[in-house]
Image (tube, helix red, strand yellow):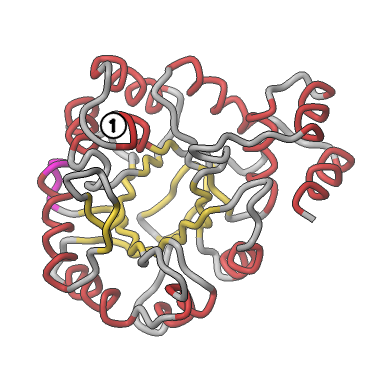
Amino acid sequence: MTNSTITLADDLTITRMGYGAMQLAGPGVFGPPKDRDQAIAVLREAVDLGITHIDTSDFYGPTVVNEIIKEALHPYPDGLHLVTKVGARRGDDASWLPALSPDELKQQVHGNLEHLGVDVLDVVNLRTAEREGGRAESIEEPFTTLVELQQQGLIKHLGLSNVSVAQLREAQTIAPIVTVQNLYNLVERADDDVVDYAEEHNIAFASFFPLGGFSPLQSETLSKVAARLDATPYQVALAWLLQRSSTSVVIPGTSSVDHLRQNVAARDLELPADAVAELDAIGA
């Protein structure tokens, strides 16, 4: 891949191939992992492979994943950036619940600081509520709360998650945005407009569930292209995302060192034009 990093601010350069830490928690992203030592090994291998962009949240576990990141990597190496998100909490039954009031957001930011063992968070994404019509709502109130925490020196940079172009524009009138994180992959392309807007404004577009998430990507076309290129289907899917725009970044997650290495190898896979055309047609 020609451009392996992206610079989003004077003090923020990240690798476009990142690592999503969500899968380091237990089943359903709840509770401790089956093998904590393996989770620690995966994180350390990610850093050894040159990844400087780790995506996390205190509601993974909850708190479990951030605590593992701290155990594995603290004190953090220079240049490593932890991107976290707020706006949700976990119920006792492992449910995902909105948590967007000012008090809830402040508690979440302080929780991330504590469990990651840092005095300031590199990037905090505001995760909007998962409900019908949620992407049409104003995010001024919750986003302003994060801006206030930024002004207090607790957050360096701000981002958004699960948002529309309209919400992204609204946030930009309040404070600079360095990243947006939405569901997007070879099959799920409803946010093409967000990807394009992010590229126009040098905002990193981080695809969450880049490989389909809890329902892994399956495509006959993808498999055929991968076989032709002597790569795995998931490597091709990640390479397609990285070539989708100059500011696309990916955060595939895994709890396996071997799978991590396979994913990271996608950063060096250049897809020829005919392969890109075939893959583009999947979501047409």
Residue 117 is covered by the magenta coloring: yes
The prevailing secondary structure element of the residues shown in magenta is: loop
Q: Residue furthest front?
A: 93
Relative to 48, does residue 83 appear above or below in the rendering? below
Residue 16 is covered by the magenta coloring: no
Q: Position of residue 222 (x, y in %)?
A: 76, 33
Crowd around label 1: few <14 · some 14–19 · many ≥20 (10 Å): many
Q: Position of residue 51 (x, y in %)?
A: 43, 33
Residue positioned 58% across, 34% down in the render: 216
Left or right relative to 182: residue 88: left
Residue 220 vs residue 168, the one in the foreground: 220
Q: Position of residue 223 (x, y in %)?
A: 76, 27
Image quarter of residue 241: top right
Relative to 207, does residue 165 appear above or below in the rendering? below
Identify which amino acid the numbered label 1 is placed on: Ala
Left or right relative to 192: residue 152: left
Relative to 222, does residue 40 appear above or below in the rendering? above
- Residue position marked by numbered label 1 in the rendering: 25
Residue 73 vs residue 263, the one in the foreground: 263
The part of the chain drawn in magenta is 115-119
Image quarter of residue 55: top left
Secondary structure under tag 1 reads: loop
Q: Quadrant of the C terminus?
A: bottom right
Residue positioned 33% across, 64% down in the render: 126
Relative to 106, does residue 2 appear above or below in the rendering? above
Q: Quadrant of the N terminus?
A: top right
Residue positioned 80% across, 21% down in the render: 227
